Structure formats: structure tokens, C-alpha cells
Image (cartoon, grey):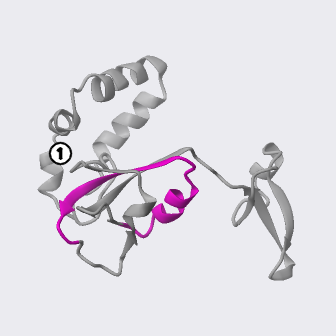
Amino acid sequence: MGLPFLPVRGVLGSDYMRVREDFREMANPYDPSERVAVVPAILPDTAIFHAYQADREGNIMSDTSLNNKLLAQAARRAVIVTAEEVVDQLSWNPRRMFIPGHMLSAVVHAPGGAHPTACRGYYPVDSGHVRHYLSCAADEEKWKAYLENYVYGVRDHAEYCRLVNLDSLWERRC
């Protein structure tokens, strides 16, 4: 049995349709006069993402712009969430997405866990670190040094936060 296919916009007419043999074009079932691309669904074994808050029951409040609920539903085996805060009761916010604990395998308290990207309301994007990351990713030797410094070379998350001076980002809450 093959993977399920999902419709996507924005790839018709692009090189993706030429280079990806698994992408297909078909009539939109809701408007047969429109053509849509369909692509294989991504079914990861494990999903890992960051959330604003987790409660002690394992429920979380996540960003709505990133569809983490779909990611959690797609994972075949495990869903691991890092969270800025662990609280007794979640702060309800209609601009955030509630994901119940029964959909998650583990929740880890990790303030700054979205770094170097932003965590809205907590800290902005660390643009300097993103630029550094991108320049290192373009060169194999720089990439190895980056991994050694920021991934393998730190004992734990707290040491990583000190290394990247996350306190300065928290001072610029967004």
C-alpha cells in the first residue's frame, strides 16, 4: 500500500513537478476546472517541536502558525515537545493551539528551546546566530566546527543557552 497523497498549492509550474517523480497533477475534486498538485504525505517516525506552555498533565499550548497538531498526528511512534514553561494550568489564548497530552509521548521543560528561531512573546529570532548557522552549513569544515561547538560540545541545554547568550534575547521579549 502506498503513502496517502495530499493536495498542495504553489508547486504547479515549478521545477518540483519535473524533478519529483512522486508529485502528481490532477483535477481539483471540488472544482474540476482547476488543476492541483498532489504529493505524498510525510509520515515521520518521530515529531519534535517547541511549545509555549505545558501543564503538569502533559497538555500544551503551541503556535498556531506552525501546524504542530498535524505534525503530532502524523508521527508514527513518538511526539516529543519542548516547552518554554511548565505551569499548573495553561493560559488559554485563542491565538494558540491546544494539543492534548494523550497525543504526546514526552514534554521537556526547555526555556529557549526554539533558539535560534523566535518564540513569540518570549524572545525574537536571533538573526546573528541564524546568519552564522547558514554560513557554517554552506561549508563542510565550518559545519563540523559548528556542530562540535553548539551540539556536541555542550553538556546540557542550560550550557547551550549560556553559550548563545540567550539572556540577551529574553531581555528583548517580543
Vertical placement of residue 14 versus 174, above or below: above
- Residue range (magenta): 62-89
| Percent x, y of residue 75 | 55, 52
Provide the secondary structure element on which disc 1 rests. Answer: helix
- Residue 85 or residue 88, whichever sits in front: 88
Q: Residue at x 22, y 37 (%)?
A: 157
* Residue that extends furthest to the top in the rendered view of this protein: 141
Q: Is residue 123 visible?
A: no
Vertical placement of residue 98 versus 48, above or below: below
- Quadrant housing residue 90: bottom left
Q: Label 1 belongs to which residue?
A: 166
- Quadrant housing residue 20: top right
115 left or right, relative to 78: left
Q: Residue at x 32, y 28 (%)?
A: 151
| Percent x, y of residue 23 | 79, 53
Label 1 crowd bin: few (<14), some (14–19), many (20+), radius 10 Å = some
Quick one: quadrant of the C terminus? bottom left
- Residue 121 or residue 15, whichever sits in front: 121
- Residue 164 or residue 53, whichever sits in front: 53
Question: Is 70 inside the magenta-drawn segment?
Answer: yes
| Percent x, y of residue 11 | 72, 59
Question: Is 50 inside the magenta-drawn segment?
Answer: no
